[in-house]
Amino acid sequence: MAIRYRKTPKGVDEVQTRAHRLPPRARGALILVDGQRTDEELARLIPVQAAETLAALAEAGFIEVIAGAPVPAAPAPPPPARQPDFKLVQREAVRRLVELVGPSGDDLAIRMEAARSMDQLRPLLVHARSLIGNVRGAQPAADYIAALSAL
């Protein structure tokens, strides 16, 4: 059975104020917890050690399990995955990042341009989503990832 998490008041406080100074990986995972995504969905979005990160956040009181939350019916299987064109994704990721956050994203944009594979680019995209979320809000951050996923 899928597990759903939601932020506790302590977790909401950390997202808003950074009062507890979570490491970037844990903070990024905390931001993704919305009460809607299951642990499997979160595991696809958290690039490294998703289960351990969620367990640590729960143990520290930043998130909690939503007991008895209904799990939607399984969606139809996705069509066979196509490999995204790395250079296209890389160019669009940099262009959209700079468009959304301006000069505050320059260092990250340079690191994204230096990536030589999707495996190198993927963690930078997670960082970009977090930066956009901090500067522009959750919806532009989600739109950023959705636009890149569509390529």
Image (cartoon, grey):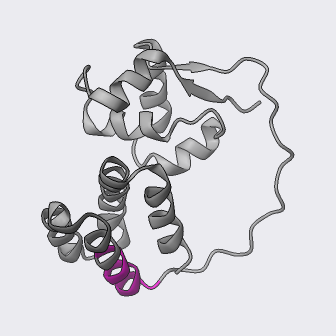
Give the image location of residue 100, x and y in percent.
Answer: 32, 67
In the current view of this chain or complex, which residue is farthest to the front? 136
Give the image location of residue 81, x and y in percent.
Answer: 64, 74
Q: In this rendering, does residue 39 appear at all?
A: yes
Main SS of the magenta part reads helix
Q: Magenta segment range?
A: 85-94
Give the image location of residue 86, x and y in percent.
Answer: 39, 81
**37 lies above or below 150:** above
The residue positioned 67% from the left and 21% from the top of the image is 66
**74 lies above or below 53:** below
The N terminus: image quadrant? top right
**129 lies above or below 72:** below
Is 22 placed left or right of 68 in the picture?
left
Is 22 placed left or right of 58 in the picture?
left
Tag count in the figure? 0
Q: Is residue 88 magenta?
A: yes
The residue positioned 20% from the left and 70% from the top of the image is 109
The residue positioned 57% from the left and 26% from the top of the image is 6
Q: Is residue 112 magenta?
A: no
Is 132 placed left or right of 110 in the picture?
right
Give the image location of residue 90, x and y in percent.
Answer: 33, 78
The front one of 81 and 142 is 142
> In which quarter of the view is residue 150 placed?
bottom right
Q: In this rendering, does residue 56 appear at all?
A: no
